[in-house]
Amino acid sequence: MTGSISLTQQTTEALRAKIAEGPMKPGDRLPTEKELEAEFGVSRTVIREAVAVLKAEGLVEPRRGAGIFVLDPVLSRPRGMPSFLPGQMYQALDLLELRMAVEVEAAGLAATRRTLSQDARIREHMADFGRALETGAKTVELDIAFHDAIAQGTNNALFPGFLESLGRNAIPRSSLSAEQRARLISHDYLQRVHQEHLAIADAISAGDADRARDAMRAHLSGSIARYRASL
C-alpha cells in the first residue's frame, strides 16, 4: 500500500511540476491517459488519481468531449482545504476533528432555525442514504448532501460554505484507497452511519438543540474512533 501511495504522489508531483515549471502552460490540453501511462510508466488508476488531485487543486479542468486542460495556477487555485491523496488516513482524522468543531454547533442551530422545507430536505437525504444501502448504490455523495442540508438549516451561510470548501474530503471514506475501502467499509459500517444520521435528523425535527448536538458529536466521534482503530 505504501508503495502505491508513493507512486501516486510521485506522479502527481511530476505532473504538477510540468504545469508550474513547463513545458505545459494554461490552456494546454493534458496528454491522454494512455500517453501519460507510457510517459510515467504507471497504471491508469495512478494517472486518474493524480489528475483528480490536480483537478481538486484547481490546476486542471475537464471539458466535455475535449479532454483535460491546464488552468492558470495562480488565478484558478481554489480557496479551502488541501486535497488528500488516497490512503492518507491521518489527514482524514484531522479533518474529522475540525468538522466536529463546526458541525456539532451546526446541528444545534439547525434544530432551532431550520424551516419546514429545510427539515424535509434533511430527512429526504437521510432516506436516500438508506435506500442506497438497500440497493448497494454509492453513498458518498448522499452523505455529503445530508450534512450540507444540516448546514443549510442553520441559515448561516458560513456553515454550508465551510463544507463546500472541504468537498468530498469531508467524507473520510472518499479518500481511502481501494484496498482500504474493501477492508473497512462494510454494509454494517454504513448501516451504523445511517442510524447515526437518523438520530441527528430526529433531534433536529424535534427542535431539540442539545440532543442534536449530542447526536452529531456521537456520529463524528464514532467515525474518528473507527478510522483511528483502522490505523
Image: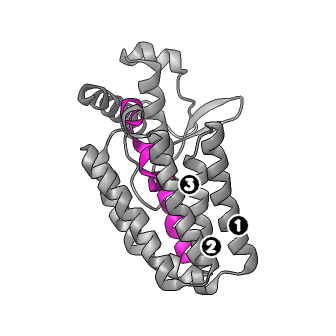
Q: How far across and down, in percent of the image, does residue 80 sit?
A: 45, 61
Q: Is residue 162 left or right of residue 92?
A: right
Residue at 63% across / 38% down in the picture? 137
> Looking at the image, can residue 147 be seen?
no
Residue at which label 2 appears: 152
Contact (CB < 8 A) between labels 2 and 1? yes
By what rule are the colours in the image chosen?
A: one colour
Secondary structure, mark 2, is: helix
Residue at 49% across / 38% down in the picture? 52
Segment tinted magenta in the rendering: 156-181
Q: Amino acid at mark 3?
A: Asp
Q: Which mark is residue 198?
A: none
Observer-nearest residue: 10 or 211?
Answer: 211
Q: How far, Cα to Cα, is label 3 from label 2? A: 14 Å
Q: How far across and down, in percent of the image, does residue 224 sit?
A: 33, 57
Q: Which mark is residue 121?
A: 1
Q: Is residue 141 left or right of residue 230?
A: right
Quadrant in which the N terminus is drawn: top left
Magenta segment includes 70:
no
Residue at which label 3 appears: 143
Quadrant in which the C terminus is drawn: top left
Observer-nearest residue: 176 or 218?
Answer: 218
Q: Quadrant of residue 94?
A: bottom left
Q: Quick one: which residue is furthest to the bottom in this view?
A: 112
Q: How far, Cα to Cα, is label 2 from label 1? A: 10 Å
Considering only vertical position in the picture, is 99 above or below 174? below
Q: Amino acid at mark 1?
A: Arg
Contact (CB < 8 A) between labels 3 and 1? no
